[in-house]
Amino acid sequence: MEKTVSRIVTGRLGAFGIAALISGLVQMASAATPTLPDATIDNGGLEPIYHSGLPLPLPRPDIALSYAAIPIKVTPPERRPAIEDILPSSTATLGQMVKQQTGLESGSEAIFSLRSGEGVAKLLRRAGYSAKDIAASINAMATKTSLRSLPIGLKFTVCENGFVFSNRAGRDIYTLRDPDSGWLALTAIRPVESYLTFAHGIIENSIYRAAAASAVPDNALLEYIRIMGFSVDFQREVRPGDAFEMLYERKIDLISGEEIGTQLHYAGLRLSGDQLGFYRFNKDKKGAGWFDKDGNSAARTLIRTPIAGARLSSSFGMRRHPISGYNAMHRGVDFSAPTGTPIIAAGSGTIKKAGWLGSYGRYVQIRHNGTYSTAYAHMSRIAKGITPGARVQQGQVIGYVGSSGRSTGPHLHYEILVNNRKVNPLTVSLPTGEKIDPSLLPVFKRTVGLVNNEVMANGALRYVANDLTLLDE
Ligand SMILES: [Zn+2]
């Protein structure tokens, strides 16, 4: 019987603008923004105003302030204008934008989907536009997007004085009839609000079930497993009573109410006697990495358990062979899992073998570098594109659990080879990824402090609370 104790806390981004600091990409609404509008609620013609300015970080008490109370003038640093400040915000209805930009009334609105083989012109004809309006409006619209790249099924909301569609997440393209200057087109930003959610839970059985019970979004959970998988063997090291902690961001489209993305920012695990915590950080323009509080990379060259939701069923070493009955050396580890469970590449590299290999059944071997290779056996199916010579990225699905070859039931037989010698995947020491660049360490430490504040505000993590050195670099 599964019993999971878990708690989930969701809050609007704190005054620190923590996620903005972390991702640098967050669009935020001001604190005055109402909660999610329900598309069915008539807001009485009130146009919501979304203000995307990031709040300034709260200053630390200045020592000077403990002297005489002489007024001081503070000039906040000038911020580069964000794209959201330049482009207008999308409105809840097309009519509101028509009115706002042109002063015209919109009349009734209808939705048309782009049909196969149909261009925008044909769609507008269906909507009742005149040939003259079609030509002029498409000319205007073509200044904002390529007419060729519009997918079949794309939805256009059309009224007499304009139409709107979105072919890029978070952006709307409006084409409007201006009574003075003719047809014009503009790009508007869909208002998005970010919520930070803290989830933690006691693990009773599996981390997957515990996290699922907390309604953690799938991609945040998968990211968590990937990050933790470098350091933790979920099968052996996680015990009942251990706890997971996640801080993730949910982005909500305020017009549609839909969730348009999630991003994990903190991955924590409290093991009996050990505490792990990793922070997401944009280490350069190329992307983000995961690091512990001292800036050591969470990533290892290889993942010890390249499968999700599995149970270790046979470890490395001497054992009585389940089929032959003889004692023999087992030079890999077996993870029992249902047929079809995805198997991921333990590290980036090149496929050396992919196909049938005797008692191994369907088998894939990856060469990671001059020293390390990994092998995966008994698959039911090898993933598409996994052929000798193909490049794979760490975490990429390479095949699916099965029972092909000499096997008694669905499981993954996994091997790590060091200089072609098979070693124990669960104990072999693996090189770590790169440390954070020292020049970025102060910024990173600030990120750590903000995340820890956010986590603490949600009532968890004594161990972060104790680590006050992080908070004043
Ligand atoms: Zn095996």
Image (cartoon, rainbow, N blue to C red):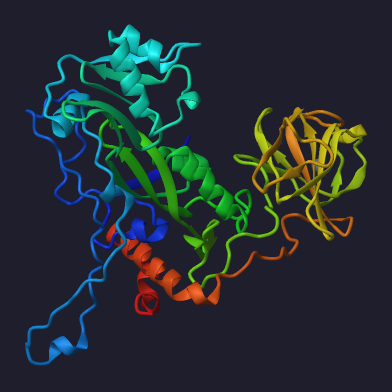
The residue that appears at 73% across and 60% down in the rendered structure is: 427
- Where residue 410 appears, as percent x and y from the top left, is 73, 30
Left or right side of 119 for 110: left
- Where residue 257 appears, as percent x and y from the top left, is 28, 32
The picture quadrant where one finds residue 302 is bottom right
The residue that appears at 26% across and 71% down in the rendered structure is: 77
Left or right side of 144 for 241: right
Whether residue 463 is situated above or below residue 195 in the rendered picture: below
- Where residue 370 appears, as percent x and y from the top left, is 84, 59
| Quarter placement of the C terminus | bottom left
The picture quadrant where one finds residue 385 is top right
Q: 144 or 430: nearer the eye?
A: 144
Q: 377 or 73: nearer the eye?
A: 73
Left or right side of 228 for 316: right
The picture quadrant where one finds residue 445 is bottom left
Observer able to see residue 354: yes
